[in-house]
């Protein structure tokens, strides 16, 4: 999906924030992530430092995207990124 499509999906599904997945992960945010695995690594390093996915995604705006639901509390508390791919 494109960045525009990912952003639209996130806006349309904001109601999922605060809910729990079937495996018990609490969705703290929905973020657009590059679909390419090596780009994901670069994106995630930037995101974990800034906690601003819309800034971290800028270098990848022309590429394919996925939308992830992430557990923001676990990132802060345990420095572990738990995510679930919502759409790609």
Image (cartoon, rainbow, N blue to C red):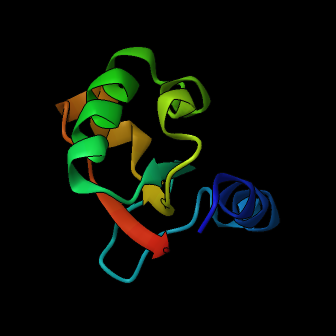
Q: State the image coordinates of residue 23 (x, y, percent, origin top left).
A: 30, 78
Q: Quadrant of the N terminus?
A: bottom right
Pick the front one: 16 or 65 = 65
Residue at 30% across, 43% down:
39
Please state the total of marks drawn on the protein image.
Answer: 0
State whether residue 55 is above or below residue 80.
Answer: above
Q: Quadrant of residue 18?
A: bottom right
Residue at 23% across, 54% down: 37
List x then y, in percent, for residue 86: 49, 73
Name which residue lies at 46% across and 60% down: 68
Q: Quadrant of residue 25?
A: bottom left
Name the residue at the top extreme.
Answer: 50
Nearest to the observer: residue 4 or residue 76: 4
Extreme-bottom residue of the structure: 22
Q: Position of residue 12 (x, y in %)?
A: 81, 66
Residue 42 located left or right of residue 55: left
Q: Is residue 39 above or below residue 57?
A: below
Q: Position of residue 6 (x, y in %)?
A: 65, 60
The answer to whether residue 64 is above or below residue 54 is below
Question: Left of 20 or right of it: where is 29?
Answer: right
Residue 12 shown left or right of residue 75 in the figure? right
């Amino acid at each position: 999906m494109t960045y525009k499509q990912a952003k639209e999906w996130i806006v349309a599904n904001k109601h999922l924030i605060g809910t729990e997945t079937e495996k018990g992960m609490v969705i703290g945010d929905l973020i657009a992530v590059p679909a390419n695995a090596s780009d994901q690594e670069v994106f995630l390093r930037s995101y974990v430092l800034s906690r601003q996915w819309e800034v971290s995604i800028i270098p990848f705006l022309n590429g394919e995207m996925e939308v992830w639901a992430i557990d923001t509390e676990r990132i802060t508390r345990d420095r572990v990124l738990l995510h679930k791919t919502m759409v790609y």
